[in-house]
Image: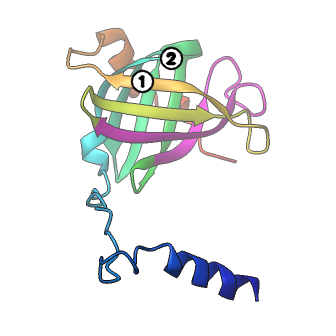
Amino acid sequence: MRAVMIVAFAAACGGGGGGGGGKQTQVPVPPKQPPITASEVVGYWTGDWGRLVLRESNGRVIGVYDHDEGTVSGAMNGNTFVGWWCEAPSRQPAKDAGDVELTFSTGPSGKTIDGRWRYGADSAWREDWDLAWNAGEPPPELVARFSDPAAFCAKP
């Protein structure tokens, strides 16, 4: 009964009696952006936790970042990278590894990442890994860390 009353109230308030002919105003919906591909996120980023360099490798995305010789490994799911981070010294959860999600967007100020991460796979998410695209060249010492495959950890 309540749902019927709400529908009737909404119809009555929709401007049907004031000469508007019962037409409802359509609010324009922005077109949905196509998903971002892995090749569109590779490159050099800077922000929280220092510098991050992302590469595509065998259909996956891998990255290296400054903090504690960190690495990420995962895949794109729509506009979000979903993966696993790990850091020195142990590269093991729950102190030195965990889930990570990096959501990519493009706006008036350029390409950005809204990132979140957590220790292991069960702790609370932390919302403090935001980055912006850096058009410069990534530092060679950071790029050199891609040559150590043992630094890229798989989610247990």
Can residue 72 be found in the magenta stretch? no
Pick the front one: 53 or 107: 107
Dot 1 falls on a residue whose secondary structure is strand
Residue type at mark 2 is: Asp
Residue drawn at (32%, 36%) of the image: 55
Residue type at mark 1 is: Leu
Q: Is the magenta stretch mostly helix, strand or loop?
A: strand
Question: Is residue 17 positioned above or below 146 on the image?
Answer: below
* Residue 52 position in % (x across, y down): 41, 22
**Residue linked to disc 1:** 131
Residue drawn at (39%, 50%) of the image: 79
Can residue 98 be found in the magenta stretch? yes
Residue drawn at (39%, 27%) of the image: 146
**How are the colours assigned in the image?**
rainbow
Figure quadrant of the N terminus: bottom right
Pick the front one: 43 or 87: 43
Question: Is residue 13 positioned above or below 63 on the image?
Answer: below
123 displayed left or right of 101: right
* Residue 58 position in % (x across, y down): 34, 51
Q: Which mark is residue 81?
A: none
Kindly check if marks 1 and 2 are in contact, taking CB atoms under 8 A apart as contact: yes
**Residue linked to disc 2:** 48
Please state the extent of the stretch shown in magenta in the rendering: 81-106
Disc on the earlier residue, 1 or 2: 2
Question: Is residue 32 positioned above or below 108 on the image?
Answer: below
